[in-house]
Amino acid sequence: MSDLIVALVGRPNVGKSTLFNRITGQRIAVVDDRPGTTRDRLHAQAEWNGVSFVVVDTGGIEVLPETVVAGRRQGPERVLTQDSAPFIPLIRAQAEQAIREADAVIFLTDAAGGLTPGDEEVADIMRRAKCPIFLAANKADNERLRQDAVEFYGLGLGAVYPISALHGVGVADLLDDLVDRLVPPLEVREEAGWEDDEGEEGGLKLAIVGRPNVGKSSLLNRLLGEERVIVSPVPGTTRDAIDTHLEWKTEEGVVPVTLIDTAGIRRRGKIERGVERYSVLRALRAIQRADVALLVIDGLDGVTAQDAHVASFVLDEWASVIVLVNKWDAVEKDAYTMIEYTQWVRNTLRFLAYVPVLYISARTGQRVHQVIPTALSVQEARFRRLPTGELNRLVQNAMARHAPPSKRGKRLKIYYASQPGVDPPTFVFHVNDPELVHFSYERYLENRLREAYHFTGTPLRLIFRRRERKGE
């Protein structure tokens, strides 16, 4: 259930960020400080009563100028003026986007400020929503304000939850009802024939991601046009999306393939804040569901900052990936262009040698036939499991070739290693002191694993745990 989405919608200064922090249990982080991948923090994972979901804080919707009387805020006038008209499309764009993408919406209002025309505009859209809407009157910090919150029943959206996001009052009741609506009790699910996400069809799942206008749709159409595939549409698990199912014929038989298309992740600062957040969220959900992400780059534009922005999401999700440089037929090139371009991709996108880079043309079909076979080899690597004996022989040989580092006279000791999981391959090294593991030695061990077993296109997760031996 971890891909359930709960959106927070409302005017500025109604407390959306405060409620975001309250639900997620953390202070909101606006940037990621990893070098080369700084980006806005758009969402966070949350859990309530055993139900996991993603909470998204949309941008504040500015509607009407406020009137000021005797230096005190009186709230917006209740008439839509000519000055307010340009804001109405923005209200509708953000609210409608939230409705389309979210599994539930928390519509946040200001109990202290009272009902406003901006609230009424958003409510008009919410009344037509198919997903559940939870109306929360925030800043109800005392009994009088909680009683005054009854005026929000006039919006016609059902129950009103008087809450104080700052102090946590009423938030638990809101979340109790929200998760009960999203995920009914077990006995109700069984009676209704509820199917969990784990029942999703197997085979190879490919997410096509990238910024707008790099040729994602053209690639999808070209893949579907191959003579070796049989195409049929099937409903996807992402809300309001249709995945494309095809069967890819190999020498060993037929492999079911699901293509998960996404909207382009737009450049920050060029579009409305709310739409940007949801375009990112769609891509994240696709990456989380997929075995392999196909990161499409426009060969004519080269590797851009926005490509690095998209790549950061792929890296954050520990996704297996293939970089597809599209429109290669239109690129002026010589004998060294492909080599230089590949190095540019790896340096700019923080990808090392393990990621395949294919140069394709969705328009002409150049090398498109290599995409799915390459993805199948990457998927195989993602689910590769090493026998414990072989793994430990590899580690011992690696330590013999290059001794572990020491720090302040104390040397790192690796007692043994195991692989507890795949998807992605995860290796646990039991050591005397994890603080002695320098990043360069961790990279060395990863390179030895890749050298021996060719984990093409997939990240490796290396975990170092302390284990004391007797007498030490």
Image (cartoon, rainbow, N blue to C red):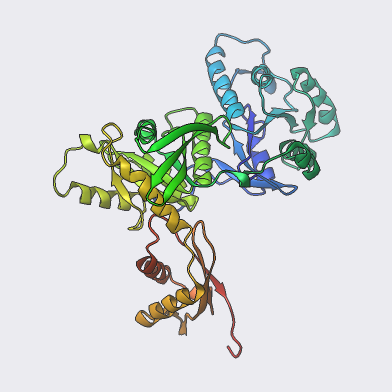
Q: Tag count in the figure?
A: 0
In the foreground, 46 or 245: 245
Q: Position of residue 361 (x, y in %)?
A: 27, 36
Q: Residue at x 51, y 29 (%)?
A: 275
Q: Residue furthest bottom?
A: 471
Q: Residue at x 28, y 42 (%)?
A: 367
Q: Position of residue 42 (x, y in %)?
A: 54, 40
Residue 120 falls in image quadrant: top right
In the foreground, 268 or 461: 461
Instruction: Answer left or right for 343 relative to 274.
Output: left
Q: Position of residue 267 (x, y in %)?
A: 41, 34
Q: Position of residue 119 (x, y in %)?
A: 67, 21
In the foreground, 407 or 158: 158
Residue 116 falls in image quadrant: top right
Quadrant that contains the N terminus: top right
Residue 135 visible in image: yes
Quadrant that contains the C terminus: bottom right
Residue 401 falls in image quadrant: bottom left
Q: Residue furthest left?
A: 334
Instruction: Answer left or right for 367 relative to 212.
Output: left
Residue 176 visible in image: no
